Amino acid sequence: MTYTAAEGRYESMRFARCGRSGLRLPAISLGLWHNFGSVDSLENARAMLRRAFDLGITHFDLANNYGPVPGSAEETLGRLLKSDFGAYRDEWVISTKAGYSMWPGPYGDWGSRKSLLASLDQSLRRMGLEYVDIFYSHRPDPETPLEETMGALASAVRAGKALYVGLSRYSPEDTVRAAKILRDLGAPCLIHQTRYHMFERTDEHGLLDTLAQEGIGCIVFSPLAQGLLTDRYLDGLPEDSRAVKSGVFLKPDQITPEKLDKVRALNRLAQARGQSLAQMALAWVLRRPEVTSVLVGASRPEQIADSVGALTHLAFSAEELAAIDAVTLG
Ligand code: NDP
């Protein structure tokens, strides 16, 4: 059926300026790492994108290798852009990345100019796009000069194939060096993508400060710890969950009884706030002023709606924050 976006789609979403740029991003963005591959249901992918956009999510995050099979999440997006969302292209921010293994041989991986620019051309073809809004270096490459990787990002902007560039998984020190190179090349770093959630606090001791100082936006991936910080595993391991279905990135043996005790304690705190655990986990990440957007994944449209519901209750009392710390750091 032809899709017409919901009239009120911008009424409840919050938008924030990404670092010192002019680009405003939604507080919640949607990632297509899981559940958008060629092995997954196209109808479910369509339903999730429709629900997301209807709720004001305007930013969709991909990478060359998302699938499975690698590349197929971009193909899914390309198909759905054509059938459903083409009229809304200018309301969308579409990101992709290169830097992890994508095709055989020495040029399908890491951060050489050859690899990044060939990968971006492939991504554009798969998505049927003339440009992406954000092109990322997916991870630092210790064997390629930083000047070369950053030069490739800046070339993508000069060629009109990307509007902005970003970094993913760079250390604070490398971020500062990369940001200087990009500034000098006239393609300032827009955004940095990093993992941060109630159980993963590393970035509180460096990266978040660095991003604020550099005027770079921060988008947090896996804010729900891939589903652990939700009600998903409270009553066992569901057959259709990431830990059981995929079991590669979130392994069943990571979901220990000790971890689940903590998740249950957090769930009680969320209930006391009148929220789902997923909503509290997202609000907790968004409490940091450095964070521009949380980048969630989903396996069904209802999860996206639940996650966007976090925006109705973002504030925490000092007591609530202390109680969360006592559970997660204790
Ligand atoms: P999350 O931590 O948000 O985990 C998503 C999973 O949590 C879903 O698949 C679902 O699990 C479960 N879930 C989501 N919402 C709810 C809800 N409201 N209630 C209950 N369960 C829920 O993020 P991801 O790990 O998926 O990462 C998000 C995005 O970040 C990726 O798609 C990708 O774009 C990006 N990313 C970037 C990386 C990088 O290196 N730059 C690395 C990793 C991710 P289930 O499937 O079991 O239902």
Image: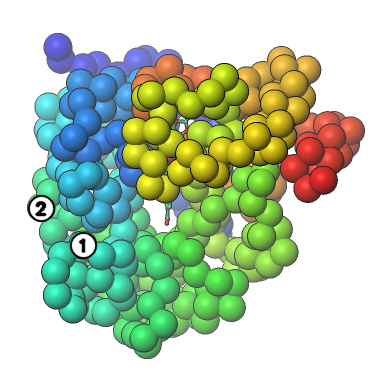
Q: Residue 232: where, in percent of width, then height? A: 52, 25
Residue 254 found in image quarter: top right
Q: Compared to 57, does 175 lie above or below?
A: below
Q: Residue 80: where, in percent of width, then height? A: 17, 31
> Can you see residue 165?
no
- Three-letter amino acid code of the residue under disc 2: Arg
Q: Secondary structure at mark 2?
A: helix
- Three-letter amino acid code of the residue under disc 1: Met
Q: Residue 197: where, in percent of width, then height? A: 62, 45
Residue 255 found in image quarter: top right
Q: Which mark is residue 102?
A: 1
Q: Is mark 1 within 8 Å of ligand 1?
A: no
Quick check: marks 2 and 1 in contact, CB under 8 Å? Answer: no
Q: Earlier in the sequence, mark 2 or mark 1?
A: 1
Closest to the camera, between mark 2 and mark 1, is 1
Residue 203 found in image quarter: bottom right
Q: How many marks?
A: 2
Question: Residue at 47% of width from left, 77% of height from top?
Answer: 178
Task: Tell me the crowding category of disc 2: few under 14, some 14 to 19, or many 20 or more residues within 10 angstroms, Cα based.
Answer: some
Q: Compared to 29, does 210 lie above or below?
A: below
Question: Residue at 25% of width from left, 65% of height from top?
Answer: 101
Q: Is mark 2 within 8 Å of ligand 1?
A: no
Residue bearing the label numbered 2? 125
Q: Residue 127: where, in percent of width, then height? A: 16, 46
The quadrant the C terminus occupies is top right
> Can you see residue 140?
yes
User: Is 107 on the left or on the right of 61, as rendered?
Assistant: left
The image's colour scheme reads rainbow
Q: Secondary structure at mark 1?
A: loop
Q: Compared to 33, does 280 lie above or below?
A: above
Q: CA distance from mark 2 to mark 1?
A: 15 Å
